[in-house]
Amino acid sequence: MKHIRNFCIIAHIDHGKSTLADRLLEFTGSVTDREKQNQLLDSMDLERERGITIKSHAIQMDYIYKGEQYVLNLIDTPGHVDFSYEVSRSIAACEGALLIVDAAQSIQAQTISNLYLALENDLEIIPVLNKIDLPSANPEEVKDDIVDLLGCHRDEIIPASAKTGLGIEDILAAIIERVPAPSGTVDEPLQALIFDSVYNPFRGVETYFRVINGSIKKGQHIKFIATGKTYNADEVGTLRLKQFPRTEIKAGDVGYLITGIKEAKEVKVGDTITDAKNPTVNAISGFEDVKPMVFAGIYPVDTEDYEDLRSSMEKLQLNDASLVFTPESSAALGFGFRCGFLGMLHLEIIQERLEREFDMTVITTVPNVSYHAYTHKHPEDAIIVNNPSDLPDPSSLNRVEEPYIKATIITKSEFVGNVMSLCIDKRGVITNQTYLTTERVELTFDMPLAEIVFDFYDRLKTVSKGYASFDYSPIGMRASKLVRVDILLNAQPVDALSALIHADNAYTIGKKITEKLRELIPRQQFDIPIQAAIGAKIIARETIKALRKDVTAKCYGGDISRKRKLLEKQKKGKKKMRQVGNVEIPQQAFMAVLKLND
């Protein structure tokens, strides 16, 4: 066991994490020239195009150092804030972490949040200064920042360039010398932590785990503690670029397990694997069910594709257990699904994957978050509201609570004013402001999650000219004054456009939506009133004027009553039309609600 090292890489998006992993694999000879490609551990096209890691990966490398052979297990972590729970489990499976900081961009928000996660788990941190070959790099200044953040010595920071391969040898030496070997005993009952799972269409779910104590053998009868289910270990092995089956994996090592499970939901990240006959007494702490944070309706453009969409979603769920969906129907859009996502990036990825992998064109309704409503009758029992139409009648409502987050924003000092006014617009309350250096400021806000769901990230990048980095973590539910704004078209409510909004913003948002819809809905033969309402009270109205024929054109001069008669006749016809008329809403009208500030 003393020759095993388990480590992960933590960094902000685009600081060179995947590239460094590529270099480590090349240097240790884990990949042949034929298998080499950029972002080797990223398996999806989407990951390569966007340069982000969506699914974490694990890979084992052999390295000979001072004449002794070591096994290095790299447990890769996704970088984005939506997947922070997966990151926390990957970190819990390691003893050390490479902290990568871009020499041109310095320390950013996610670097800090992931670093705190690593420090909570008592990981040995090895700071790496990446991209020092860039002309815009300031290695000395950034080194000072790292020393301030970590309290380490300057000479402990390894200068490197993942692109050219500079410093890779020093990194490997540091991993072996500084990262402690795993502690654990082979003689105790099996105790292993699940940190990831992948769906293989031929073999079912492959579970990736790290053995803390004991050992796991092929054919062993095992049990998952959180779900309480038992399985047979059909195959266990280690993860190279391809899988290598083994007969036994002992304490301290990382491997994969195939049990023929067909449902991704049965394998929960953070669960503990133990022996079915001789189970361990204590499960590994920190397990939680992943809770969706953002909800949106997904509908097929053509209602006939509903069944195809269902099967596409089920297949996607096999790959991504954190996607939840339930069928729902809408008067305006027909049948579809109400889906729960971890965050906005997750929503975008699912939408993109539906289009690419399954050829499904879908309409996504306004994303919203999950609220808790309490009625006067049962002030203690929360009604969970994922869809605005589930909100109880305002007369019976006691209070509504909404999820709050702690937002950490790091930006250049010249943009502090802009960032603050943006956050205060979004009902944020500033809780802390620290100057990391004279140039860089860390701002902390308490904000409602609903406010950052729409366009917050894009606007943050705009007001800070792209310099601000943003990270958030949930801090629980707080009571808020929320109302449901309904949109009525021709006096008919359109459920897909309803939204739960803070009472102070309801009027402004209602007005903006009605104005936007007036531009987008084509004119008909009759007047169409567009109204925003809270309960029975109309708060904003716009009218789409009717297309009219000039019926008085044939009256030259003559008596005014003749013209009036013709106009009255036309008015009656329009009124009758309006009673039976049906208004078609174009697809971009649903999307426009998301972009109210443009």
Image: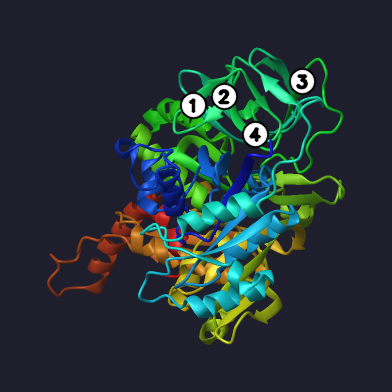
The residue that disc 1 covers is 243
Gap in angstroms between the C-alphas marked 3 and 4: 17 Å
The residue that disc 4 covers is 253
Gap in angstroms between the C-alphas marked 1 and 3: 23 Å
Q: SS for tag 2? A: strand
Q: Amino acid at mark 2?
A: Gly
Q: Position of residue 349 (x, y in %)?
A: 45, 46
The residue that disc 2 covers is 237
Q: SS for tag 4? A: loop
Q: SS for tag 3? A: strand
Q: Left or right: 452 with respect to 15?
A: right
Q: SS for tag 1? A: strand
Residue in view at x 63 percent, y 53 percent: 177
- In primary-sequence order, the first of circles 2 and 1 is 2
Q: Amino acid at mark 1?
A: Gln
Q: Quadrant of residue 383?
A: top right
Gap in angstroms between the C-alphas marked 4 and 2: 10 Å
Residue 586 vs 480, above or below: the answer is: above
Gap in angstroms between the C-alphas marked 4 and 1: 15 Å
Q: Which mark is residue 275?
A: 3
Front of the two marks 4 and 1: 4
Label 3 crowding class (10 Å Cα cut-off): few <14, some 14-19, many 20+? Answer: many
Residue 279 vs 61, above or below: the answer is: above
- In primary-sequence order, the first of circles 3 and 2 is 2
Q: Amino acid at mark 3?
A: Asp
Label 1 crowding class (10 Å Cα cut-off): few <14, some 14-19, many 20+? Answer: few
